[in-house]
């Protein structure tokens, strides 16, 4: 039954993976391993991820009109909300390198043959809904503080935000709300996509395992979330071009973090069930 396959996976039963306790050193080690994966063949990964800085520039240009300026920061920060699914191909490259297989960039597209694609799409839809809710929330917050009027120019908008009390309220409340949305995504998907790529467990099991991993390692995953936020900020600050390095490194590192958190399947090795 296709619906059950999406929820429970190919085994037609809820088989929950065992979650390990990790430490701060494991988090930074995952980041180092992700950087190592990236530097193995950086040209492939930069080519694969050029779409992200290009998309960032397009977003900046699109929101440069006065009507869309209030959504500039929410759209940029929203990268962190949809990032987990955007890095699917990078997880596959790290998985193949782990197995000693060919890691040419075109193999990143092989995820389309994974039996877990329906479950991946289901969680991807969940992230899309969260992203839309975040944009609507950010828009409502802006209107509640500044009213329905839109800034007449970019300089006027920045002046309003950084030199008025309501502007600082927007920054404070906006970041607080953004943190809650990011925390929701972190809890539910931090290792969900690598798990689905590794074994066809189903969407419900993947989300549950991510939540359990967060509950077992709260400080470590909050640290991971902060690292992601800081590196994405650096990528944006470098006129979006930095995202071509930041995103693949974080994608590869997420795979290695998953390997440290989730016990391998008994007798299955790292084959990913494929």
Image (cartoon, rainbow, N blue to C red):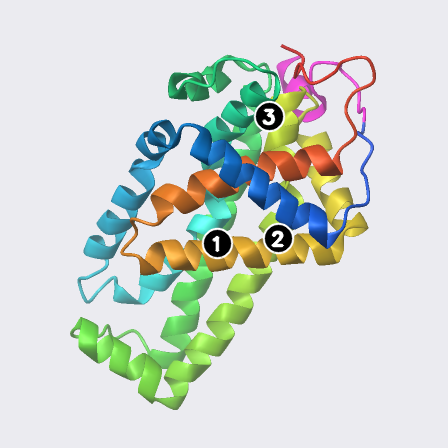
N-terminal of the pair, mark 3 or mark 2, is 3
Image quadrant in which you'd find residue 29: top right
Query: Which stretch did the figure color magenta?
Result: 1-15
**What residue does disc 1 label?**
133
Q: Disc 1 on helix, strand or loop?
A: helix
**What residue does disc 3 label?**
119
Q: Is 268 on the left or on the right of 75, as rendered?
A: right
Residue 10 location (% of width, % of height): 69, 14
Residue 205 location (% of width, % of height): 73, 31
Q: Magenta stretch containing residue 239, yes or no?
A: no
Q: Nearer the viewer, residue 110 or 14?
A: 110
Question: Please, is residue 150 above or below residue 31 in the view?
Answer: below
**Furthest-top residue in this view:** 274
Q: Disc 3 on helix, strand or loop?
A: helix
Q: Mark 3 or mark 2: which is in front?
A: 2
**What residue does disc 2 label?**
224
Q: Nearer the viewer, residue 174 or 142?
A: 174
Residues packed near mark 2 inside 10 Å, few (<14), some (14 to 19) or many (20 plus): many
Look at 44% across and 22% down and name the residue there.
108
């Amino acid at each position: 039954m296709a619906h059950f396959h999406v929820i429970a996976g190919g085994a037609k039963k809820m088989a929950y993976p065992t979650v390990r306790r990790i430490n701060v050193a494991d988090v930074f080690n995952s980041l180092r391993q992700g950087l190592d994966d990236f530097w193995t063949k950086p040209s492939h990964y930069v080519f694969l991820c050029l779409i992200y800085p290009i998309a960032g520039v397009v977003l900046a240009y699109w929101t440069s009109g006065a009507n869309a300026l209030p959504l500039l920061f929410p759209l940029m920060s929203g990268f962190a909300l949809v990032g987990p699914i955007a890095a699917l191909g990078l997880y596959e490259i790290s998985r193949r390198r782990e197995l000693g297989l060919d890691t040419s960039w075109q193999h990143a597209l092989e995820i389309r043959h994974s039996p877990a694609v329906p479950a991946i799409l289901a969680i991807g839809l969940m992230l899309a809904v969260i992203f839309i809710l975040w944009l609507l929330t950010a828009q409502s917050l802006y209107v509640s503080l500044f009213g329905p009027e839109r800034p007449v120019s970019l300089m006027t908008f920045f002046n309003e935000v950084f030199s008025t009390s309501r502007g600082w309220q927007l920054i404070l409340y906006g970041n607080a709300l953004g943190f809650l949305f990011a925390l929701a995504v972190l809890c539910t998907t931090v290792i969900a996509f690598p798990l689905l790529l590794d074994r066809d467990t189903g969407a419900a099991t993947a989300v549950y395992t991510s939540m359990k991993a967060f509950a077992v390692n709260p400080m470590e995953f909050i640290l991971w979330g902060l690292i992601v936020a800081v590196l994405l900020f650096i990528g944006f600050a470098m006129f979006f071009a930095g995202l071509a390095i930041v995103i693949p490194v974080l994608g590869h590192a997420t795979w290695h973090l998953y390997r440290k958190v989730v016990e391998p399947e008994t007798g299955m090795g790292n084959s990913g069930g494929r």
